Structure formats: C-alpha cells, structure tokens
Image (cartoon, rainbow, N blue to C red):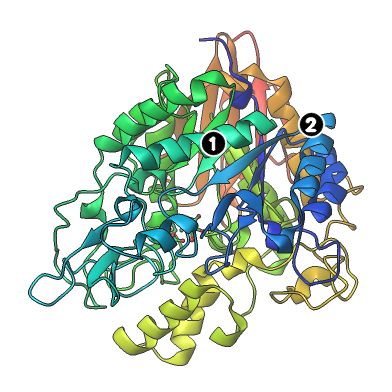
Amino acid sequence: MSEQWWQKAVVYQIYPKSFQDSNGDGVGDLPGITMRLPYLAQLGIDVIWLSPVYASPMDDNGYDISDYRSIAPVFGTMDDFDRMLKTAHDLGIKIVMDLVVNHTSDEHRWFKESRKSKSSPYRDFYYWRDPVDGHEPSNMGSVFGGSIWEWDEATGQYYLHCFSKKQPDLNWENPRVRDEVYDLMDFWLAKGVDGFRMDVISMIAKNTAFPSGEAGPTGYSNLWPLINDDQVHVWLREMRERVLSRYDTLTVGECAGATVQTAKKYANLDGSELSMVFQFEHVGLTGSVERGKWTTKKPKLTDLKRVFEHWETGLEGVAWNSLYWDNHDQPRAVSRWVEASEEYRERAAKMLATCLHLMKGTPYIYQGEELGMTNYPFKSVDECDDLEAHDAYRMLTQDCGCSHEEAMEALRAICRDNARTPMQWDASELAGFTTGKPWLAINPNHAYINAASQVDEPDSVFSHYRRLVSLRKQSLLVRQGTFELLLPESEELFVYERRLGDERMLVACNFCDRQVAFQVPAVYAGGERMACNYAEPSEGVLRPFECFAIARAGV
Ligand code: ISL
C-alpha cells in the first residue's frame, strides 16, 4: 500500500474551551483558534483534532450534543467555523472533528421526542427497558457514577446511559439511527472537514441481554460485558461503504478495550474500517481493581515498554498505530509518566516526546504538551469543573474510605481537569488566554511555562517538538521502519531500534532522574545524532532523563 497522508501526519488536539478566548467571556472559542493557527503552523503539525464544538448543554463539555449541525454559541457561529477551516486549509493544516455518536444529549430533539411516549417514532432511537423485579434491568455502573439506567417517570421505563444521565445511548440497531449518523457525517465532510475522531466508537454495539456482573466497591458492576465486540465492525464497515469511501479522511476510533487482535480489524491497512484507533492499554497501567483509575501510581517502565512493543510489533504490516501520552481525559504527560522535579521537567518533557514521536504510528500532541505543561495543584474538589472529578471525590471519600487529602492526591494525579486548564500563552496575569474570568483556573506556573518564552528559543520544549515533527516529515525510516525493543528488562531505560532497508535508528531514553550506564551499540559509531536533550554527547551513560536518536545508513 502506498503511504496515506495520515501516516505522514502529526496531529494536534485542541480542547476548544481552554485554547484561546477571543471575546473575554473566559471560554475559548473558534475565532480564538483561528487567531492561533500561525502558532500551530510554526510547530509544523499537519492536522487538528478539534474536540466537540457543536450545540450542547455542556454537561460533559460538549461530549453531550444537542444539535450535530450547529455550533455552540459559546464557541461562535458557523461562519466562524468556516473561517477557521479555510484559514487552516490555507496554512496546509487539516481539521478532524470529534464525532460523538454513541450517545446524544438528553436535550437533543431525538431524545426529547423519544421520551414523550412509548409509541413515539423516535422511541427506538434509544434503549428503553421495563423494570425487572421493580429494579433497574441490570446492576452495571456508568462511567460517571451511579447506574447505567435512568428511570423515566412519565413512560414508566428506564433508558440506558453509559456516561452521565444527560448522555442517553443511541440505539445503533435501529437503521434510522445509522442513517442519521451517516447523514451528519456527510454534512461535515461535504463542508470540507478532513475526518473524524470517533468518541467511544468501540461502545456503539451493545450486548442487549444487558447482563449483570459482580458488584465492585461502588455497588455496581463493571461496564465492559455490555460491549458487543463483533457487531461494531459490521457497522464500521457499513459506515465506510456508505460515507467514508467517498472522501479521503483520517479516522481515529477511541476504542477503550481494544486489543491488538481487535485493532487489526478496526485499523486494518486494507482501509475497510478506520485509519487507526486510540488504544487504552498504556493509560490503564496505573489503575487498580479497588479504585479504578483513581490511584497515584506511576507505571513500571517494563510494563509500559511491553505495551508499546506489543502494539508496535503486533500491528506491523497489518494495521496502523496511533501514538499518544495524553489528551483531554488524561493528566499531563510530564506529570504522569515520570517523576521529574522542576529541575528536570523540561528534559523529561523532551525525552517523552522523543520516545513517542520516533515510534511507528501517527503521533498526537495534546495542547500545551509541546510547552511541557503540568498537572494543576488542586486543593479542593470545588476547584474542579469536571462531573467525573466530583463523582470520584464522592466515591473515594464515601465508598473507598479515603480521607480528604488522599482523595485530593488521587484527583491531582489523574483527574481530567489537569489537562483542561487554559493554554499558557504568556506570563501575564491571565496567561494571554482571556481578558475575562477563566472558566477553569490557570496554572500559576504559567509565569515560567508559556508559549511566548518558548517559540523562538532553540532549546525550549516547543522547539524540540518542532524538530521532531519535522524529522518525521523528512524520514521514511521514522514513518515506516520496523520497531524492535532493546533492554526489555531495564526499569530505567526505554531503548528501541527502527529499521528500513539498510537504514537503522537507535532511540535511547532515560526515564529516571539518575545517571544510568548505557553503551551505544558499535554499529552506530559515526552515526548522526539527533533529538537530543543535552547539548554535549555523553560516553557510556545516559544522564537524568537524557534522550537521543542515532541514525546510520548502509548497515
Ligand atoms: O476519562 C475516562 C473516564 O475515566 C474515560 O474512560 C473516558 O470516559 C472514555 O475514554 C470515553 O471518553 C470519551 O467519551 C466521554 C467523554 O467524557 C470524554 O471526554 C471522551 O473523550 C463521553 O462522551
């Protein structure tokens, strides 16, 4: 297969609420994004993944959509959208929209009609079930707490919601639902958008027996047996045939629960389903049975490497990988994956970037990651906006017996608002993000972590990212070479090799704040060093958080 454009691309994720405010209401917006496009062009990225900007009551910051064909007024107008898309395209940047079609908002017209009566023509757009023995039809818990079933007094039935009760799940078995989804995809593709990031697409097909499972600490069982892993592929193929085959798109499915085996179907190079998936194995490494994701653990490096190796080698020649450290649902990369004091933060941020960007797959940069932005020092749950954080605080303190301080420690480590604090554009009081009151607090470290101090500074984290983005563009080896993990047993070093024809590249990364012995294999003698985060080369060691790559041809 010849190289597809999305295999050569680097994607940058924008979380619109927190990127750039243009009208002083404290919330980021589309004109703000348009204003900052030259910054992204300077970074060199090829594609923007835009988190949802559609009409929404914002129960889950836009992942609850009430109209798929209009823009939320807080973000601007359709004209603002068209202007942003055109300006981006003029700069050579593509835009991929977030497609949230596992569920709608309960304020979407379809759901409002659906809940009116059992005989509504929209009733079957959602999953409605009778009580079983006077209770919910199953004991499963939703992602944001409580049951997946919400009682509706008016019609005497429950409806299904895997996320908040304001996010009822669409019934994909109904062909009319699928027609509507394909139509709205067409609407945006015809406008010129370049693809979709598909929200929880691995969850659209349900096991409609709605099984109950063993209850965990919250009194509810795990959600995963609800997912029908086979049917989802049937519908994705249908979606390809009916819509995607008519356009040249990047599609990335958010696929919690995907394995290398299932990803071979989702992201097969034959193009029958999606371009690639977001897998969750590495971000899942820090969870626990008792507390779910709400722990303060750091992953073991050997586990992290095993996951990447598994995906890199497992999909080789068959399917395509995506590569990410963080996004709007994850804490900040530099706070999460390593234990780096402020002294080493910049080196660690560059090291993580090098480690990820020189693997095989399409890399994703989450806004602010390119500046080395960090988690936020939350002291109280009242400082958090995210519905999930509030539910987690309640669960940790009430169901898991944590003290306030223990619960806050978990929130500081893992809650989603860590990633959602406003972009740090400059050192001024409001970080250049807004002139009003920011919707979520700005991290006080914007005084020294900000774009203004980095864009023209050759040693900055931003410049390091910029070099990595450009390296991928120039190097077929980086884009298409095979991956081999070296030193799999090391708990300090992440070292791998890439090979293509007679070219090879060694990538060496020290994940800890100590110097560790390391000999570059003799075959690399005289090779070209790049992507380094120390000015002078070292001999026989990797210094704290050191990284570099060496490339050699003709071997
Ligand atoms: O962040 C998580 C909960 O801890 C994830 O499980 C997350 O809910 C899951 O990855 C699905 O995420 C997507 O759909 C959600 C939305 O809240 C997330 O922001 C979105 O990325 C519901 O639409």
Badge nearest the viewer, 2 or 1: 1
Of 47 and 66, nearer the camera is: 66
Determine which of the numbered discs, if any, sits on residue 269 in the image: none
Q: CA distance from mark 2 to mark 1?
A: 19 Å
Type of amino acid under label 2: His
Q: Is 511 left or right of 149, judged from the image as shown?
A: right
Circle nearer the N terminus (2, 1): 2
Determine which of the numbered discs, if any, sits on residue 89 in the image: 2
- Image location (x, y in percent) of residue 50: 65, 47
Q: Is 94 left or right of 307, judged from the image as shown?
A: right
Quadrant in which residue 475 is drawn: top right
Q: Residues within 10 Å of mark 1 (few under 14, many from 20)?
A: many
Type of amino acid under label 1: Met
Quadrant in which residue 499 is drawn: top right
The residue tagged with tag 1: helix, strand or loop?
helix
The residue tagged with tag 2: helix, strand or loop?
helix
Q: How many marks?
A: 2
Identify the image quadrant of the C terminus: top right
Q: Are marks 2 and 1 in contact (CB under 8 Å)?
A: no
- Image location (x, y in percent) of residue 224: 26, 55
**Could you tell me which residue is drawn at 42 percent across and 78 percent down?**
391
- Image location (x, y in percent) of residue 342: 71, 68
Q: Which residue is mark 1?
A: 185
- Image location (x, y in percent) of residue 393: 44, 82
Of 342 and 427, nearer the camera is: 427
Image: 310 above or below 170 = above
Of 11 and 189, nearer the camera is: 189
